[in-house]
Image (cartoon, rainbow, N blue to C red):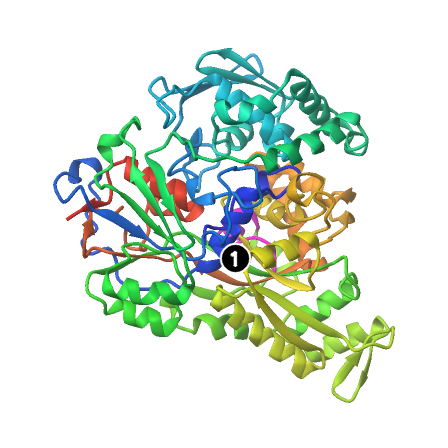
């Protein structure tokens, strides 16, 4: 899938999980972290543009990450069924973060930016064009920024306004005290301008005034902001925007969409792209389908690149497949999210009891085995962030203070009894006299997660909490969880910002969403008010969302990470059960000069790809990597 970390930059959204993130989560779900292993890139080349000459330029690269879109889709990026595969292949962002850095960026649609007089001035490339051969202008970026405010994009909490400076420059006025580095992260890395010729008619002076006033009010008084007449008009405007029928996808990137069916999208190289000469092949066959349909095509060499999850038997076969290679970039986490708004999971003691019963090591090994090459390892301490970030932001003595929640049925029993539960025979009974049962919700295509959840359900059932797994479509799973219609669900946590990791699940994208497609929904329902160590009684979603864009790396970030680690460990809103490397199997049968991998089977480019799959792959192609034989 496209990952969580990305997952989607959903953690940088202030108010809503928008349709783009929904699609990213679907893509990410299919590949579920992907077990690592395989060989290093024996023939990957790694010489970039200089090594990209020659070969059959008429070839199409076949990319099959599985389950990337549903049976219906929309070319409208604001629609819940938006076509996420356009991101970075067809429609470019301003710049891409140089993962794992939070402060370095690689130019894309923007070629330069400066902060002067409290404004972030973003200059667009002079040679950037839309695929209808019209220039990309500041009006495109300006109008996109206004419309993105309707769905609650997080950069609006960094700014107090946005204005056109000239044909190629837009100024984002930073709010007082806003850290420049975090504003750049939210704006440059997150905004993909859309053509004003298609969407600009919805941007009026009144709408701009409404968006500006709403977010200025929100920054000072969130409760007051939702009562504004401007807020109501914005909600109505977003409904109109999301429903807008778009007949043709007009991008500005290296590929244009020529055709799409439920099984395949054909992306053709667009020669009007500013670095078209760096792209050494004719286009991308972007395949769509179930996980099981990927494997035989990988083994035959018909699929050149994927990020599909390979269980140990498949992984072992891939290792012996001729010209097989595997990149293993930075890891991310698989979590069981608990619906804290639904009884009896609204009780901290009950959630803690589940943590004492669910055997994290067992359910992780059920999916990934014990071979280190499989890339899946269970997590001993639930801090809410990855082990690699724990090493940076938490001290060993702090980790020692946290509860490891070893499997302990006696402690689980005591906790449940303390909440008024009783056990009759082999079944726990809730205080209301009904049996205590749990249903795990999972995307059916994430076979590794389904396997882990089945293992967890078996352990809970043996303890006396009858449990089952509901494996459904990715779209349904995602909607159920954001609507709060679930008990225990699946989620991915990744990225380079530890506060961003907390925000991905505890922030307003997944928890008490205020705007966008899931406005008014509880999501995981944690809070909204909680007593957070070091912070006191606060609104969880708005506080962590504010911190992720106001707290820069340093002592203050370390302090806040410790505060949230204690909260997650004590309150158990979610259980991080496995840490995965992100596996990318690729074949050198027909294509060579792949981004290089080092001793650890990764590199700077692969780390960017793992953090943002489409963005990283597009960047690699722009740099001349991946050339046909």
Residue 487: % across, % down: 69, 64
Residue placed furthest toward the bottom: 425
Total marks in image: 1
Residue that lies at the very extreme toward the top in this rendered image:
166
Q: Nearer the viewer, residue 419 or 33?
A: 33
Residue at (54% x, 64% y) in the render? 379
Residue ranking furthest to the left? 54
Is 124 in the magenta? no
- Identify whether 441 is placed above or below 99: below
Crowd around label 1: few <14 · some 14–19 · many ≥20 (10 Å): many
**Front-most of residues 222 and 484:** 484
253 shown above or below 365 = above
- Determine the secondary structure under disc 1: strand
Indicate the quadrant where residue 459 lies. Answer: bottom right
Query: Quick check: is 392 in the magenta stretch?
Result: yes
Looking at the picture, tell me which residue is in the foreground, 310 or 414: 310
Residue 585 in the image: state x and y as whole percent. Answer: 31, 58
Rendering coords of residue 172 (x, y %): 56, 19
Res. 549 in view: no
Q: Residue at x 70, y 29 (%)?
A: 234
Quadrant for the N terminus, please: bottom left
Please state the horizontal and vertical placement of residue 628, each as a whole percent of the image. Answer: 18, 46
Q: In the image, 618: left or right of 494?
A: left
Does 462 sit above or below residue 64?
A: below
Residue picked out by circle 1: 333
Instruction: Report if residue 571 is visible in the image.
Output: yes
Q: Residue at x 31, y 72 (%)?
A: 316
Q: Which residues are magenta?
A: 382-394
């Amino acid at each position: 899938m496209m990952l969580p970390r990305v997952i989607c930059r959903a953690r940088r959204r202030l108010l809503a999980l928008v349709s783009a993130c929904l699609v990213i989560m679907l893509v990410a779900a299919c590949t579920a972290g992907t077990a690592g292993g395989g060989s290093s890139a024996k023939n990957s080349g790694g010489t970039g543009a200089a090594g990209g000459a020659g070969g059959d330029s008429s070839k199409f690269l076949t990319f099959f990450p599985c389950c990337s879109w549903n049976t219906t889709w929309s070319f409208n990026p604001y629609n819940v069924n938006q076509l996420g595969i356009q991101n970075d292949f067809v429609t470019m962002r301003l710049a891409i973060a140089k993962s794992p850095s939070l402060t370095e960026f690689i130019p894309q649609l923007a070629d330069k930016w400066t902060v002067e007089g409290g404004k972030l001035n973003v200059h667009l490339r002079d040679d950037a064009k839309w695929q209808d051969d019209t220039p990309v202008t500041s009006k495109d970026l300006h109008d996109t920024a206004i419309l993105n405010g309707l769905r609650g994009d997080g950069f609006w909490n960094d700014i107090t306004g946005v204005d056109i400076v000239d044909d190629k420059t837009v100024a984002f006025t930073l709010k007082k005290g806003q850290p420049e580095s975090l504003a750049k992260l939210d704006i440059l890395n997150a905004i993909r301008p859309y053509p004003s010729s298609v969407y600009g008619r919805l941007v009026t002076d009144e709408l701009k005034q409404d968006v500006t006033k709403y977010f200025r009010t929100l920054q000072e008084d969130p409760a007051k902001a939702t009562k504004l007449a401007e807020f109501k008009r914005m909600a109505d405007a977003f409904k109109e925007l999301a429903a807008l029928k778009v007949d043709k996808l007009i991008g500005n990137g290296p590929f244009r969409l020529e055709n799409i069916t439920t099984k395949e999208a054909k992306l053709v190289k667009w020669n009007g792209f500013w670095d078209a000469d760096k792209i050494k092949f004719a286009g991308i066959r972007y395949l769509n389908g179930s996980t099981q349909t990927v494997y035989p095509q990988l083994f035959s060499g018909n699929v050149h690149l994927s990020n599909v999850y390979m269980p140990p038997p498949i992984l072992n076969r891939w290792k012996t497949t001729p010209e097989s290679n595997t990149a293993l970039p930075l890891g991310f986490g698989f979590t069981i999210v608990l619906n804290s708004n639904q009884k009896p999971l609204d009780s901290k003691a009950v959630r803690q009891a589940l943590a004492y019963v669910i055997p994290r090591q067992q359910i992780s090994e059920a999916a990934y085995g014990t071979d280190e090459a499989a890339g899946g390892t269970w997590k001993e301490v639930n801090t809410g962030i990855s082990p690699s970030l724990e090493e940076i932001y938490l001290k060993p003595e702090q980790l020692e203070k946290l509860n490891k929640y070893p499997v302990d049925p006696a402690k689980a029993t005591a906790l449940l009894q303390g909440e008024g539960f009783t056990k009759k025979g082999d079944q726990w009974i809730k205080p209301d006299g009904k049996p205590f049962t749990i249903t795990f919700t999972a995307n059916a295509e994430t076979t590794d997660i389904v396997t882990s959840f089945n293992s967890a359900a078996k352990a809970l059932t043996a303890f006396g909490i009858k449990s089952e797994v509901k494996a459904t479509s990715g779209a349904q799973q995602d909607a159920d969880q954001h609507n709060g219609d679930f008990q225990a669900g699946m989620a991915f946590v990744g990225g380079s910002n530890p506060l961003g990791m907390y925000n991905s699940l505890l922030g307003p994208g997944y928890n008490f969403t205020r705007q966008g497609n899931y406005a008014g929904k509880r999501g995981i329902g944690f809070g909204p008010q909680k007593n957070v160590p070091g912070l006191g009684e606060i609104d969880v979603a708005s506080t962590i969302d504010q911190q992720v864009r106001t707290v820069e790396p340093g002592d203050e970030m370390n302090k806040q990470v410790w505060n949230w680690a204690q909260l997650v460990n004590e309150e158990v809103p979610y259980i991080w059960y496995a840490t995965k490397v992100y596996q990318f199997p690729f074949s050198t049968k027909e294509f060579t000069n792949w981004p290089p991998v080092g001793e650890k089977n990764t590199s700077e480019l692969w780390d960017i790809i793992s953090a943002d799959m489409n963005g990283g792959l597009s960047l690699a192609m722009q740099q001349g990597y991946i050339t046909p034989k």
